[in-house]
Each structure stands twice: as structure tokens, then as C-alpha cells.
Amino acid sequence: MEEKNDQKTKSFVLDQKKEKKIVAEASDLDKIEFFYVAPKKFVILTILTNGLYFIYWFYKNWKAVSSAINRKGIVFWRTVFAPWFSFGLFKIIIIQANKHGYNSKKSGYYYAWLFLIIGGLFSGVSSLFEDAVKNGQISINTLNSFIPLTLYVLGFLYLLPLIEVQKAINFNNEKINPNIGNKKSYSGGEKAVVVIFGIMTLLSVLGLIFTFLAPFFGWDY
């Protein structure tokens, strides 16, 4: 048993060393072109897809790092466990942007901690609401009326550190490649996502409004 624990500890330490090496290699490069997208577009697509787009965002940025340092097999798990690996990614991004004159007053670790803390707060509040319903402390009607709004607010706060990191990315990319193109335009696939998920979000909002107003007007649902 102790031997297995020692192996796990050794594996964890080795993984930490590997991560530091990857971050150091990427940080030392003269330039890396990351995933280029307008902050407003990033927020819209992330909200409409209930967070799926920001997973894609992490994937694209880790892929950029992987290509730059010529290392295969580092993208998948860093995307799956995005919050934990955000420390290395954000550090690389801010260092690269600063090399081209961004001069960020905050470190990559600052944004990563903010991202992790707000994410933890989001998960914690969700769990508290679920436990309160199970224990009968709040009704399901109250849950449906007020909780989603609270979670949407926390979800938006969750994006704030990512928006700041994206600003650094866009500055970096525009310095590297002045002819990079229009980051505000939507591809055909992105337009389809906006339409499909936009309709779903609209129906969800209308459902929340109905649920909130139903007790006041005596509507059955």
C-alpha cells in the first residue's frame, strides 16, 4: 500500500516537473500565435453554449502551444482538466504578450487563481441549492424562479478572467501578424451555433419568466 502511494507521489512530482518544462519551453519562444477571437464574440458563444465554447477555447490555445514547442499528446488532458492547467497556459500567454509590448500588470497565475476561485464558488453555490431542495429548506418553485439567475451571474463572472486573457492574446497575435484578419466575424458553423443555441436559450429564459410569474397569477405548470 505504501509502495503504491509512493509511486503515485513520484508520478505526481514527475508530472509537475513535466508541466514546468512545457511552460518554460513555451515561454522562452520568440512568438506563439494563440486562438484569435473578439472578447464579445467569445462571451456570446460561451453563454449560448452553456460553457462548451470555452472548453473549445482551451483546446485551441493548448493546441497552439503544442504546435509551437513540437510536443504531441499534451492537449487532450489539459483541455479536460482546464481549470487546473490554466495556470501554465495563462502564464505562457501573458509572458508571450508582454514580450510584444502588452505590459500586463497582472500575472498569468493571478488570472488562473481568479478563474479557479470563481469556478469553485459556482460549483459550491450549485451544490448548496441542490442540498437545500433535498432537505426541504427551499421549494422547487423558488429554485426554478431565483436560482438560475444567480448561477447566470456567477457564470458571467467566471468569464471575466478569460476575457482579460483573451485581450492579451489578441494584442499578441496582432503584433505577430498584423494581417491576421477579422476576429469579430462568424464562420458558418458559428452562425449555426448562435441560431440553434440562441433559440434554446430564449426558450429557457421564457420558461424562467413563466415559472417566476406563475405563482402571482395562479397559472398551473
Image: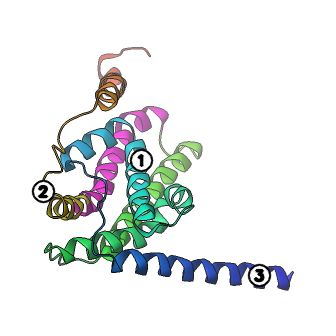
**On the image, numbered disc 1 is attached to which residue?**
56
Up-down relation of residue 198 to residue 152 (above or below): above
Q: Residue 173 occupies which quadrant of the picture?
A: bottom left
Alpha carbon distance from label 3 to label 2? 49 Å
Tell me what residue is drawn at x 19 percent, y 37 percent.
185
**On the image, numbered disc 3 is attached to which residue?**
7
Element on which disc 3 rests: helix
Whether label 1 touches label 3, CB < 8 Å: no
Between label 3 and label 2, give the one nearer the viewer: 2
The chosen color scheme is: rainbow
Disc 1 marks a residue whose amino acid type is Tyr
Q: Is residue 127 left or right of residue 8?
A: left
Magenta stretch, residue numbers: 139-165
User: Magenta stretch: dominant SS?
Assistant: helix
Q: Residue 195 occupies which quadrant of the picture?
A: top left
Tell me what residue is drawn at x 37 percent, y 62 percent.
118
Q: Give whichever of discs 3 and 2 has the lower sequence position.
A: 3
Element on which disc 1 rests: helix
Q: Give whichever of discs 1 and 3 has the lower sequence position.
A: 3
Disc 3 marks a residue whose amino acid type is Gln
Between label 1 and label 2, give the one nearer the viewer: 2
Which quadrant would the C terminus be assigned to in this image? top left
Q: Give the image location of residue 147, x and y in percent.
A: 38, 42
Disc 2 marks a residue whose amino acid type is Pro
Q: Nearer the viewer, residue 144 or 70?
A: 70
Asked if residue 150 is among those painted magenta in the image, a careful observer would answer: yes
